[in-house]
Amino acid sequence: MWKSLAATLITAAFFGSGLAKADRPDEFTPGMETMWEVMWHQSGIPTRLVRWEQDNITVSVTGVNLQAHKQRTLDALRTVAAEAGVQVIDVSDQPDLARQANVSIEITPNAALSENQPCETRLDFETETRIESVTMQMRDSDVARCVLHESMHVMGVRGHPDGETVLSYFAHHVEGLAPLDKAMLRAWYSPKVRGGMTPFEVMPVLADELVKISPDRKQAEHARERFFAQTIEQMQAFAQGEGDVPPILKLCGKATSEGIRFGRMEMSYFLAVAYQKGATVEQDAAQATRWLQRAASLGNRSAQARLPSDQPTRS
């Protein structure tokens, strides 16, 4: 049900000061935890990567108090898009083009959105691969703290991880992109990545970008492999109904029992793809079949389509 929707609603809420991650023996692991968390929808579902496939996007900014907010909004979106290698073209003052803009941004009166949800972005796509269009709304009084956060969503980065990122519900800062934000965007729009990739296919590219900005690359490379192994183990438990979603999803109060149930099914399929392609793990045909059977038994249509007709489904 969830993945058949042509649009994913991304809400932004800010609850005050940041939550510190537990102390780690390396600097890489907390960053990688944040990278992993960004691949989750707030309802409790691991997601595929979606992004723009063209080199530019056309943007229309409308609403109240535009003299104060329009340039700030465009500057923030251009800052984010530049990291992804995407050009932002403002067509707000060209009526015919503005109606056809693929990114529509509205600055709303404060009463139009709640204080707990001062801004929101909706990505529209026919399949979970390529963004077709985007709509964004921000309250007049909250543009400054929302605009970078929402601009990240415009580029297809949907999660709300903990950590040093403008995407965090517990925002540490809103004046500029953090190093993790830039690394995410570079990975998202890397030539190594394509729309529709599963989290395990994307994770090595995210990790590579994080290694590049780590002060001790050798240590980061070792931590990278440990993180992969631990995450695979944790996600196998999650897919089997024994583990849980990342803690930030529970802390934000957005995860639902229905979302988590669907997430376990999706994770079963993502594990099958990982073992089939050798993404994050070594290729293992037997494990790939095992997880494909489980995903199919839970109702995953992609798994059912890929499972050979002579292979039974298993719970």
Image (cartoon, rainbow, N blue to C red):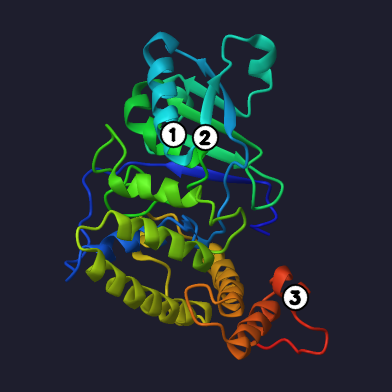
Q: Which residue is mark 2?
A: 86
- Characterize the local packing of mark 1: few (<14), some (14-19) or many (20 or more) Cα atoms within 10 angstroms: some
Question: Going 41% across and 16% down the picture, which residue do you hit?
Answer: 71
Q: Could you say whether the residue bearing mark 1 is in a helix, strand or loop?
A: helix
Q: Which residue is mark 3?
A: 306
Q: Which mark is residue 82?
A: 1
Question: Going 47% across and 40% down the picture, which residue do you hit?
Answer: 84
Sequence-wise first label, 1 or 3: 1
Q: Are marks 2 and 1 in contact (CB under 8 Å)?
A: yes
227 or 114: which is nearer to us? Answer: 227
223 or 234: which is nearer to us? Answer: 223
Give the amino acid type for the residue marked by disc 3 in the picture.
Arg
80 or 116: which is nearer to us? Answer: 80
Q: Is residue 208 left or right of residue 258?
A: left
Q: CA distance from mark 2 to mark 1?
A: 6 Å
Location of the N terminus by quadrant is bottom right
231 or 135: which is nearer to us? Answer: 231
Residue 304 rendering spot, x and y as whole percentages: 75, 75
Residue 240 rendering spot, x and y as whole percentages: 52, 82
Q: CA distance from mark 1 to mark 3?
A: 38 Å
Question: Going 63% across and 87% down the picture, which residue do you hit?
Answer: 285
Query: Up-down: is 74 above or below 47?
Result: above
